[in-house]
Amino acid sequence: MAYDHTEIEKAAREKWASLNLYTVDFSDNVKDPYYLLVEFPYPSGDLHIGHWYAFAVTDIYARMLRARGKNVLFPIGFDAFGLPAENAAIKNGLDPKEWTYKNMERMRQQLTTMGPSFDWSKEVVTCEPGYYQWTQWLFVKLFEQGLAEHREAAVKWCPKDQTVLANEQVIDGCCERCSTPVEEKRLTQWFLKITDYAERLLTGLDALPWREEIKEAQRAWIGKSEGAYLEFPIVGRDEKIKVFTTRPDTVFGATYAVLAPEHALVSALLPAISNKKEVEAYVHATAQKTERERSENKEKTGVKLEGVNAVHPATNEEIPIFVADYVIGSYGTGALMAVPAHDERDSEFAQKMGIPVRQVIAPRYHQTTEPGIYRPEEPTTEKDGIIVLIKHWKEEKYLGLKWKEVAWGTLLTGGVDEGLTPEETVFKEIKEETGYLHLQIKQKFGVVDGLFYHVPKQKNQHVHGHMFYVELKDGEQEAISKDESSKHDLVWLTVEELETFLTPDTHKHTLNLFRNGPQPYTGNGSLVSSGEFSGRESEDAKWEIVKHVGGEKTTQYRIRDWLVSRQRYWGCPIPIVYDPEGKPRPIPKEHLPWLLPTDVDFTPTGKAPLASSKELQERVTKLFGEGWTPEYDTLDTFVDSSWYFLRYLDPKDLHDFSDAALMKKWMPVNRYSGGSEHTTMHLLYARFFTKALYDLALVPVDEPFTERFNRGLIMGPDGQKMSKSKGNVVNPDEFVQKYGADAVRLFLAFIGPYNEPGSYPWSLEGVASMRKFLERVMRLTERAQDVSEVGNELQQAIARASIKVSKDGDRFKFNTGVAALMILVNELEASVAVPKTALSSFLVMLAPFAPHIAEYLWEKLGGEGSIHQQAWPVFDASTLVESSAEVVVQVNGKRRGSLTLATDISEEEAVRAARALPAAAAALAGKDPSRTVYVPGKIINLVG
RNA sequence: GCUGGGGUGGCGAAAUUGGUAGACGCACUAGCCUUAGGAGCUAGCGGGGCAACCCAUGGAGGUUCGAGUCCUCUCCCCAGCACCA
């Protein structure tokens, strides 16, 4: 029996078609419904290996579930609107519609060669009026709900092609077609208010059993941050600068305010500004910058608004106002309070501009090295202290204190006594502890908090350490008390020596500030120089401070409203017309579908192609009257794909977008398989649509997809991403011709875990080995014979495979599923007789993976109907209960051998048997084990 | 930089609640069969050692009778976000 895969595959497909195997029966109320969804393809015209990976592997699961008695909906369609069709039109003068339909026809043929069990009767094509009229209807629903808005916004513009570009057409700030740097242009655009759903899109994630990776990517995209609005009045004016901050606890450290160049206040303040020209020039220069230039050059720039000042809301001090492009106009309020001591960007800007830095939070160190590890369980006393770095009067050396009682190297320290300032304490302590008399405080580094266990005093201390740098003027010294000199030795060290000498982290911190200059501290800690809040925990005092300065708690999201206008032809027309006043009006349902006109010019002219249609204008005039004008933009194709999974349930419905009863039964989608590139945009948009429609009572669920799996990527045979320029592109058709569709399916299933987004190299030998496996299966079938009873061991092997393969399918781990089938084949091959019944069970399990050859061999065995109508082999639990098992014998946790023991043996007997094992006895060297661990069926550990 | 996911043979990868590390396959080696083989069959295949054994899941510690799996630190790779206040 030769394996003529071409003939076998053709025959199998004809058989399935004649039996109409894959049309899902919506009226079935007995079987459990299961909705298995794969992202529908764009009809690019050529089916590549990635399509195979997406559809053929997911098909394995669809088939497996059907065999397991589920009523499976496994639909397919085309995401048929989009740019490539229009580019083909521009480049080669083809009609986008013809081009698309021709491609779809070709792709349907190619998809068929995979042998997938799609239910084609549910096919959805987004560019068909029967589909897009409902995209339009849903848009109108959102518009009526206030979720679609018409407003001005910046768009990407290619000056060379004279056309607006979609975000995804901008690669590294350049036009994807001509590599010209993209500019921004302001146009009135349609937005869907996804921001209204930001919080629900975020909290909804918690209950979804998706991989953390996917959920985190969505969380990052939504970008929630909690903070407050604070207001900084402008001296002598009515306007106030409203800022957003997540760190109101640092407000006392705000030493200037910054406005984004596009902030409305900048132009409002211009008359009052004395350096008006400079400010205007800066604002203009920023506006000229492309997105690329802004993100490339992270060097801080900005201009001070001379002649105007803001009032600090806590201290009432006047602080300067700057305009700087490191502030993003569209985030928060487009203005911020700058705290250079506690924000990296503000620190950088302040250093460049020479703006004062004010520390308001003390960095905190818990001592984590011996001696003096902080003991959180014991009480802690708080006090102020000093940490002083002292320079020698002649040499480049600094004073270290080497403690005698403990292995502790420090700078000079001391407690600040009642009534003394830290500065006074510096003079006092230096004199007392070292005897040096003449010195000068050169630098103050602010405050650092140290929490440590004071070994001599035997208690925890929390010291607010005021850091100083002091230079001795000369070596003149008076005698110090015995008491002082007995505690420590004075040593003069270089900076490098000091670094390893110092024990407490706070002292290392002091040295670091001396060597590297001020660094912003962005953590939490005790507040200092913060008026009545000084000494408080920054985190605890945060919201009280907001209240104190008259601020308002608020939450900001990074996610922006979804811009859905595209100045493109091949898309769903936006169902809007403008009345003579220019007000947008939704197109009434009776005029839907609002057809895409055909008399248009696609050549990029800087205007939307629909504007060139005479028919469209005539249509509007005829239906709505003189003075009414059409909307010329079309919808982003992500809108089309945000609800297609609802349409699959009722693709031909002329009266509604879907069927309420069917949605109730089939939604949410049980499992959605797709690519990781759709983790944020598509998945968020589809979730947003579902939630919005749920609120309109149009959809019965508020999350569309219960499970989501991102599949991996197939790389070229060289392990590199496939690309024409590398010449490593794998053409699936070649392999299908040579080895057959079943071998290709098996290999794709076997190549790696399907439940994680890894990348797997294609391998010629790998596909060939799957072909060999299938040939072995054929030879095995030839050996099959009628045997009255299947042996127990074979029965168990089949049961093991059945459980393993279905469990692995549920986890989307087809690689180990295939391995289990291979193991079963190995066992069948090894058995003297191959019972037909055993082989049938195997073929039913192989069928989801290799549907064609399984069908063929099923017939050879004389099976009735189609193998794809057969039930998955299910076994009684008792089949798997084994009377004996191999148990590993360990001595002190090391393997010394193994025993085959009855599973119901007592621990005592098991241990006796283990001790009788020569290797175990030798390892025990005649001694009795002090303890034994027995895990039945697994392990016996004798601990000596 | 931040967040998330990972590091296991020459390669793709396996490993329920902690319980024989490397299943299954590729490549490779030896042998058999064959006119021949890009076929088939048998055996081997983490490292060291004649062997008993010893060492091995990025590295260092720890918990445990027992750790790829749990904890702490650290290095490296991948992905997402990134001047988001």
Image (spheres, coloured by chain):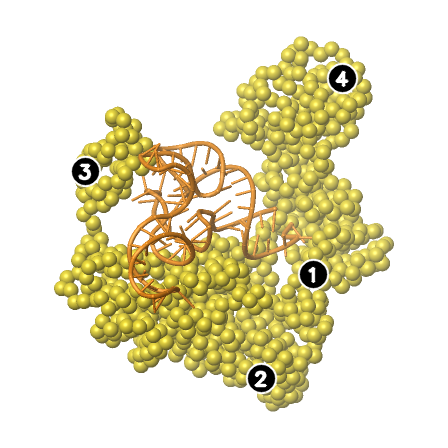
**Nearer-N-terminus badge (2/3):** 2
Marking on residue A252: none
The tint chain B carries is orange
Taking the spot 73% from the left edge, 19% from the top edge, the residue there is A430
**Nearer-N-terminus badge (2/4):** 2
According to the image, label 2 marks what residue? A95
Marking on residue A906: 3
- In three-dimensional space, the C-alpha distance between marks 1 and 3, rounded to whole angstroms, equals 74 Å
Chain holding disc 2:
A
**Nearer-N-terminus badge (4/3):** 4
* Mark in front: 1 vs 3: 3
Q: Secondary structure at mark 4?
A: loop
Question: Disc 4 residue type?
Answer: Tyr
**Residue nearer the viewer, A428 or A929:** A929
Please determine if labels 1 and 3 lie on a single subunit.
yes
Q: Which class describes the residues within 10 Å of circle 2: few (<14), some (14-19), or many (20+)?
A: some
Q: Secondary structure at mark 2?
A: loop
**Nearer-N-terminus badge (1/4):** 1
Q: Which class describes the residues within 10 Å of circle 1: few (<14), some (14-19), or many (20+)?
A: some
